[in-house]
Image (tube, rainbow, N blue to C red):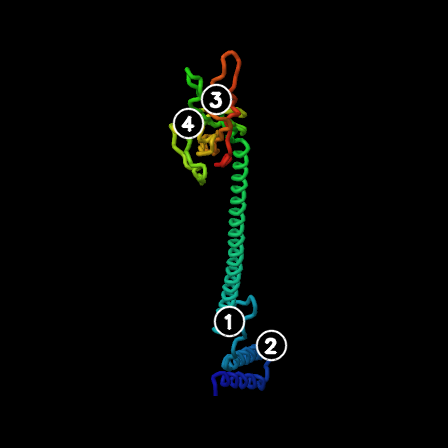
Amino acid sequence: MSRGYRLFFVAAFGWLALGTAAPSNNSARANHAETAHNVENSLARTANSQAQVVEQARPGEYEKPCEEGERNYRSDLCAQWEAARAARDAADSAWWAVFWSIFSLGLSGAGLVALLVTIKQGREALAKAEKANGIAQDTAKRQLRAYVTFSKLIFIPVFDRDTKLLTRLKVQGRFENNGQTPAKIVACITGGQWFPANEDPGDFYRQFRESDAIEVVISVGQMSDFGDFTTLNLNAVKLREIYTKHTRAILSFKIKYLDVFEEIWEASHASELVVYDDPAHMVRPDPNGIDNFNTLNFGARILQGAFT
């Protein structure tokens, strides 16, 4: 028997013994009542103690999982639940972090593509602007630069001082500036050759002899004469062969000039000399005004117009 039950039976036996004893007087009865009350309280306390011992002796149950916000660290299961919940929260946070990282990466990729497209469009616009600017500059240059073109041949007969007969013929090319700005002539190149009447000169007019450098400025709308063909020796005998159509004389010109933009250009011309009258009958004009010579005695058959 347990110690608790033995105390219970001893208390009950004492109470019965006191109850059977006859009280001698009123004082004794009062003492007996107080003693009985004390015994009753002792029995009640004993019973409660026994009940607590029995309750503590029962095997314990598993703790319920912690509720949201609950902090019960006395239970291992609760601690494990808290750890699992923290792991779940960490996993959720990690998932959202990955999600936002991927989303940000997508936005960055879209921004990069948009930037590349913008750069490409900017380059295309810049190229078009440069092209348009180049066209505008070229148009302005074409409008403002000098244009030197061949105008006509100038015939200058040379007569003998004594006989007054024609000895030779000087031929010059007249060039005109039809542009908007002055032109500086830096070189005049001439070419001349004799051919039999039945022979085709071909592209001889494109063959030139380089001349010494010159510097002549032709203003807008003005003309200037160049060339002499002294090497061709257009004397009276050769001129008569042209007149009788036994031979041909091909004359060619080319000048080089600079415009205001310091760009160099060329103007060329080629013609065949034509003699309409017999040179043997050509004499120097009479000082008194009788003139039997006219520059219309000579002409030119154009083989190639002004070319560059």
Tell us which disc is closer to us: 1 or 2.
1
Name the residue: 48% across, 69% down: 83
**Mark with earlier residue (3, 1):** 1
* Chain-order first, disc 4 or disc 3: 4
CA distance for labels 3 and 1: 135 Å
Which residue is denoted by mark 2 in the rendering? 30
Residue in the picture at 56% in, 66% down: 69
Q: Secondary structure at mark 3?
A: loop
| x, y percent for residue 227 | 43, 27
| Circles 4 and 2 in contact, beta carbons < 8 Å | no
Q: Considering only vertical position in the picture, is 261 above or below 32? A: above
Q: Earlier in the sequence, mark 1 or mark 2?
A: 2
User: How many numbered dots are placed on residues in this image?
Assistant: 4
The residue singled out by tag 3 in the image is 282
Looking at the image, tell me whether mark 1 or mark 4 is earlier in sequence order: 1
The amino acid type found where label 4 is placed reads Val
Residue 54, placed above or below residue 280: below
Choose between 121 and 57: the one closer to the eye.
121
Q: Which residue is mark 1?
A: 81
Q: CA distance from mark 4 to mark 2?
A: 190 Å
Q: Which residue matches tag 4? A: 237
